[in-house]
Amino acid sequence: MIDVAILVPEPSVAMSAVLITDLCWVAALYAEQDPTDKIRVIGLSGDPVPSFSGLDVAVNGSLADVEEASLLFISAFWGSSGRALDRNAEALGWIERLASAGTRVAACSTGTFLLAATGLLDGRVATTYAPYAKTFRRRFPAVLLHPERAITDAGELMCADAIPSSLDLIIACLGDLHGPDVARRLAADFLMGIRRSYTVANLAFDGQKYHGDRTILAVQRWFERHLDEPIRVQDAARQFGLSSRTLSRRFAAATGEAPSLYLQRLRIESAKSLLAQPGMTVGEVARAVGYVDVASFSATFRRREGVVPSLYGLSEH
């Protein structure tokens, strides 16, 4: 089984397809693997895929060549979503088969239309390229579209709204595939100078929100809204009229994780997003994610990430 398949729809946005491919190749090299054995760039037929700008995107496989993959990226198409869906219709069943077999799927920008057309996103959260949001809602009313979100994760079905957020999404997925050290090196090498107006903290938590317990979902959202405050699990229990024991039991049953650990992980993921952007000190980041004691924040961060906050994101060459 290959590690990564990259679907290039027609007509392609070559920048999107090449960006994904380059990052996947670098990640494989950082992981000391041979990219030619681990990565397949896929077109419908295996022929070069035309792009809107007149440049063909080279591929090294067709839909028939990939039956299993750990990770599938869907790059962006250009132009009318209706024509693109018609033109790439034969890829929909292929995407659905891979996802059903356990492949994690990440759709970039307009590529989310192809993922939504499979029906896999029905009842699940998604985002897409903002100018296409109205069309997306009309075509896929069953999808929980949030165009204000840069990145979403609907339980192994992930979406990014544009190129900057696609960078974060790709690196996050490759980090899950190859490990956090590879993700840190990619972020240091490819996110330098990127000024993001959003946080990627929710990326790791969307998939834990499809449990059906509305009270626990409200607690999760309350954690997110009050993340910059030194809140505790006991505070959430009081807020929602539950005992700490009941909250802990229901939270673990719904999400698979104790609320204290979930809150800690939410803080650290938010801190990682802030640390990736220049201009904030470690103390400022600590306070922004609800830590009063900077030493405690640094110790927790190091325990979870294997590196102190001040060194997070620095590349090792």
Image (spheres, rainbow, N blue to C red):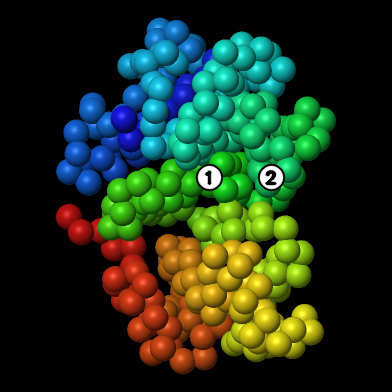
**In terms of depth relative to the viewer, which is nearer, 311 or 211?**
211
Of 22 and 42, which appears nearest the observer?
Answer: 42
Residue 250 at x, y = what percent?
66, 73
Residue visible at 17% across and 43% down in the picture: 32
- Apparent side of residue 19 relative to residue 179 in the rendered image (left or right): right
Tag 2's secondary structure?
Answer: loop
Q: Is 77 on the left or on the right of 82, as rendered?
A: left
Q: Amino acid at mark 2?
A: Arg
Whether residue 187 is situated above or below residue 46 in the rendered picture: below
Q: Quadrant of residue 313?
A: bottom left
Q: Which residue is mark 2?
A: 124
Q: Which residue is mark 1?
A: 156
Amino acid type indicated by mark 1: Glu
Q: Identify the residue at horizontal 50%, vertical 16% (top origin).
A: 51
219 vs 33: above or below: below
Q: Is residue 203 left or right of residue 127?
A: left
Location of the N terminus by quadrant is: top left
188, above or below 260, in the image = above
Q: Total label count? A: 2
